[in-house]
Image (tube, rainbow, N blue to C red):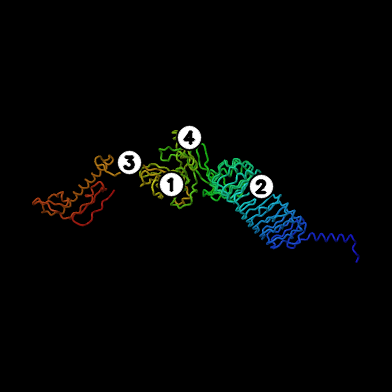
């Protein structure tokens, strides 16, 4: 064999050295860029024989429970070390000292309980240190000394009870959330360049004003899941904030004056604040807002919040966690994504212009965009003050009415139709209008959607030149009353029947709103009865009357409702009495006619009885005229003039004893036999 030349020896030596320097552990995968991945290999120790040129080492999701300094001796060029999600319980002193070039160290999600003084000794170039999600209970006061270049420190999710003073002049990001540390002050954070501070879940009831004032470069502040009941004055003045997280604090309601100086906000998180809505124009305080989070709030998706989805689109603001931002009330919108609702879904009234005899007036009508019950809210808006009924009519004096969809009511049994409780404020009355919509009737001194606004004065009475028919035309399905007494209400159902040509019948439901028993009473009326009278009502009481198509469920049928108040009983008629001295002029002809009929019937009966007696009497018998007393059961003796009681062989006819005006007298009286027990012929009634 020919010996190798010196040049060949040199080439072979370089190849051998290259293969040795590029070695890769069997349980790892290596790349030419200097990255080694030893992930999910169930390793209980650090891999050996790592190339000295390794720059990025990922050993997460293993079972490593201990570290040794000699395992890092040859890794002088290592810049990134990820040991997260292992089983480390401690950090040996000086274990990382050979890693003088290390910039990023991730020890998160282990079981570390204590940080000693020399745990990070030698890491003079370290910029990012992640220790979150461990079991750290204590940290040595000098544990972070020497980390002059540290930019980011994450300690959230531990059990730290005492925070050592952090003198980190270059620190930009600090996360102390979800620990047991007491409220921190300016002496705890000697970090003049801090830009992001996260102190969520520390059960803070207030924020240290001096601390916030010292952080002049702070752009991100997370105070979520604390116990703040108000926005701190110092926080109000932090105009440099770009990102603010207030999630889960019991702030109550949002006040615009608390946010008026935060004009540079780019991201705002208002999740889980128990908000039912936002004041209209609230987000105009943040002209630079790009991202908004408002999830997990029980939004009341009625007309006052209809502007919100429109604003989101017009302002080009991204709503984060959109699928978790849903409506809670009313039931028709419950569970719907707030940002996906259209304006008509909020049940807002629409305003139109109508010409009346007094000129041009503004009236309101319900939305006409009717699709499905699950996406459309029908509402009858308030009528203008000029068309309000006066106080002397059957209606209540109103200052403004607010319409709520019938679907607001929880699905209840057909026999128990009730308005939602406490939906109308300040004495407002909740009723159903002609379209089955729940309406708040406000007192003259109140107005607003829920009768929540105090009016400066009462409304003036309506002008006589304005026809009240204008209001009626807005509600074509209404029912009305024709005549009201102290015990009855006559209803006009013409219009209700006319608008429902295929109705099988009408279900009338009425209840006494003034009495202790307000249970509904139901009547079924055929459609051929356009006028119907409710009788047996209580005097001086307010009744609610509703009509709905017969055979349809109450919660899906279109009902028409009204209220009417029965008249009181006059003082003279409180006790029933009969005026016997001066009979009514209308009763005189009736009494006269009855008396004539009675006299004619008696005379006819007497004549018939006489003829029969004469026909049956013997020829040799003395004829004598029957005394009128015989009709009364008495007979006169011709011998001695005495009278004796006659045997009851003649049964008097009922018509002869029922001669009082309290009974009806037959116009034709039948014959009553006198000498047998055969019953009288039944009288014929005309």
Dot 2: few (<14), some (14–19), or many (≥20) neighbours within 10 Å? some
Residue 570 circle label: 3
Residue 194 circle label: none
* Label 1 sits on residue: 546
Residue 81: x and y in percent read 71, 56
Front label number (4 vs 2): 2
Q: Are marks 4 and 1 in contact (CB under 8 Å)?
A: no
Q: Cα distance, mark 1 to mark 3? A: 28 Å
* Label 4 sits on residue: 356
Mark with earlier residue (2, 1): 2
* Label 2 sits on residue: 190
Q: Is residue 392 above or below residue 635?
A: above
Total residue callouts: 4
Residue 77: x and y in percent read 76, 55
Relative horizontal placement of residue 254, taking residue 44 as reference (left or right): left
Mark with earlier residue (4, 1): 4
Front label number (4 vs 3): 3
Residue 236: x and y in percent read 59, 42
Q: Cα distance, mark 3 to mark 2? A: 87 Å
Of the pair 651 and 488, the residue shown nearer to us: 488
Mark with earlier residue (4, 2): 2
Q: Is residue 421 above or below residue 93?
A: above
Front label number (2 vs 1): 2
Q: Residue furthest left?
A: 640
Of the pair 254 and 240, the residue shown nearer to us: 240
Q: Are marks 1 and 3 in contact (CB under 8 Å)?
A: no
Q: Are marks 4 and 3 in contact (CB under 8 Å)?
A: no
Q: Is residue 96 above or below residue 686?
A: below
Of the pair 49 and 269, the residue shown nearer to us: 49
Q: Secondary structure at mark 2?
A: strand
């Amino acid at each position: 064999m020919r010996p190798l030349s010196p040049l060949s020896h040199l080439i072979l030596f370089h190849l051998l050295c290259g293969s040795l320097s590029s070695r890769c552990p069997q349980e790892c995968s290596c790349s030419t860029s200097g990255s080694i991945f030893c992930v999910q290999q169930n390793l209980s120790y650090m891999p050996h024989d790592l190339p000295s040129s390794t720059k990025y080492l990922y050993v997460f999701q293993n079972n490593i429970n201990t570290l040794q300094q000699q395992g890092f001796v040859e890794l002088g060029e290592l810049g990134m070390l990820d040991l997260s999600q292992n089983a480390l319980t401690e950090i040996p002193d000086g274990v990382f000292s050979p890693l003088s070039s290390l910039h990023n160290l991730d020890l998160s999600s282990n079981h570390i309980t204590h940080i000693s003084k020399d745990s990070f000794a030698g890491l003079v170039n370290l910029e990012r240190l992640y220790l979150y999600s461990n079991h750290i209970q204590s940290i040595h006061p000098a544990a972070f000394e020497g980390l002059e270049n540290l930019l980011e420190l994450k300690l959230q999710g531990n059990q730290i009870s005492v925070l050592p003073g952090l003198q980190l002049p270059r620190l930009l990001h600090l996360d102390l959330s979800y620990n047991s540390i007491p409220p921190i002050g300016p002496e705890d954070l000697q970090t003049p360049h801090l830009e992001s501070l996260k102190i969520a879940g520390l059960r803070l009831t207030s924020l240290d004003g001096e601390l916030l004032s010292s952080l002049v470069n702070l752009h991100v502040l997370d105070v979520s899941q604390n116990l703040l009941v108000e926005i701190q004055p110092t926080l109000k003045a932090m105009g440099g904030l770009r990102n603010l997280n207030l999630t889960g604090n019991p702030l109550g309601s949002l006040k615009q004056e608390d946010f008026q100086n935060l004009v540079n906000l780019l991201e705002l998180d208002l999740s889980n604040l128990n908000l039912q809505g936002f004041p209209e124009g609230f987000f105009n305080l943040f002209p630079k807002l790009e991202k908004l989070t408002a999830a997990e709030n029980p939004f009341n998706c009625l007309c006052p919040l209809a502007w919100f989805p429109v604003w989101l689109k017009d302002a080009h603001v991204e709503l984060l966690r959109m699928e978790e931002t849903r409506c809670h009330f009313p039931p028709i919108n419950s569970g719907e994504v707030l940002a996906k609702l259209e304006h008509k879904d909020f049940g807002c009234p629409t305003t139109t212009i109508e010409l009346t005899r007094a000129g041009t007036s503004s009236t309101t009508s319900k939305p006409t965009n009717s699709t499905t019950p699950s996406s459309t809210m029908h509402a009858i808006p308030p009528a203008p003050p000029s068309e309000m009924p006066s106080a002397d009519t059957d209606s209540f004096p109103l200052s403004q009415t607010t319409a709520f969809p019938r679907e607001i009511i929880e699905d209840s049994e057909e026999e128990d139709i009730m308005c939602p409780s406490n939906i109308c404020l300040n004495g407002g009355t909740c009723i159903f209008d002609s379209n089955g919509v729940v309406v708040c009737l406000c007192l003259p001194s109140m107005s607003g959607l829920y009768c929540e606004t105090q009016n400066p004065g009462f409304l003036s009475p309506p002008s006589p030149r304005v026809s009240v028919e204008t209001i009626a035309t807005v509600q074509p399905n209404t029912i009305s009353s024709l005549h009201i007494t102290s015990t009855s209400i006559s209803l006009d159902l013409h219009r209700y029947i006319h608008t429902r040509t295929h109705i099988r019948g009408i279900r009338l439901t009425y209840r006494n709103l003034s009495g202790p028993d307000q249970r509904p009473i139901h009547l079924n009326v055929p459609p051929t009865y356009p006028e119907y009278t409710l009788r047996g009502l209580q005097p001086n009481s307010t009744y609610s009357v509703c009509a709905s198509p017969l055979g349809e469920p109450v919660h899906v049928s279109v009902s028409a409702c009204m209220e009417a108040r029965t008249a009181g009983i006059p003082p003279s008629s409180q006790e029933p009495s009969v005026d016997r001295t001066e009979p009514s002029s209308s009763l005189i002809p009736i009494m006269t006619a009855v008396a004539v009929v009675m006299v004619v019937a008696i005379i006819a009966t007497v004549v018939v009885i006489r003829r029969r007696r004469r026909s049956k009497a013997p020829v040799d018998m003395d004829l004598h005229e029957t005394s009128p007393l015989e009709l009364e059961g008495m007979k006169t003796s011709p011998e001695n003039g005495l009278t004796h009681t006659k045997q009851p062989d003649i049964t008097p006819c009922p018509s002869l004893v029922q001669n009082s005006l309290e009974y009806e007298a037959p116009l034709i009286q039948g014959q009553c036999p006198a000498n047998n027990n055969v019953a009288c012929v039944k009288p014929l009634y005309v």
